[in-house]
Amino acid sequence: MTGAPPEETSKDEKWLLHVDGSSTTQGSGSGIVITSPRGEDLEFTVKFGFKALNNRVEYEALVTGMRMAHEARARHLLAYSDSQLVVKQVEGTYEAKE
């Protein structure tokens, strides 16, 4: 991220992270939206330099979004994904096979 660093926020202020990964025969990428406690949206599209199955791309989208939120100084983050597999594994409901 570039530009002036965002203002410090309290660890109790909630940030939101919405991610969606996609994989096609041409490549993979994700859409990431980070919403600050003040309602400001930071929107990103990320193209990954690898081909992968959709589940891996969904994980990469989540990890990338979490890193970006950390750089924006988010301390309390609520993450959302449309991938049931990713959500259930992060919650601990499902276990990864590999």
Image (cartoon, grey):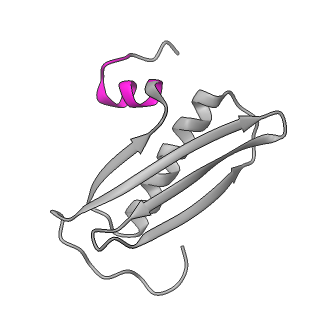
Q: Quadrant of residue 67?
A: bottom left
Give the left or right position of residue 74, taking residue 67 as reference: left
The percent position of residue 28, horizontal first and vertical second, equals 72, 42
The percent position of residue 41, horizontal first and vertical second, equals 44, 69
Q: Quadrant of the N terminus?
A: bottom right
The percent position of residue 60, horizontal first and vertical second, equals 56, 41
Q: Quadrant of residue 80?
A: top left
Between 73 and 21, the one lying in front of the other is 21
Total numbered labels: 0
Between 76 and 32, the one lying in front of the other is 32
From this viewpoint, which residue is outermost toward the left? 12
Residue for point 48% across, 68% down? 42
Residue for point 83% across, 33% down? 25
Give the left or right position of residue 63, taking residue 94 as reference: right
Q: Is residue 91 magenta?
A: yes
Residue for point 40% across, 70% down? 72
Q: Which residues are magenta?
A: 85-94
Residue for point 71% across, 31% down? 52
From this viewpoint, which residue is outermost toward the top? 97
The percent position of residue 31, horizontal first and vertical second, equals 59, 52
Magenta stretch: dominant SS? helix
Give the left or right position of residue 47, taking residue 39 as reference: right
In the depicted structure, whether residue 12 falls above or below residue 78: below
Q: Is residue 83 magenta?
A: no
In the depicted structure, whether residue 43 falls above or below residue 38: above
Q: Quadrant of residue 51?
A: top right
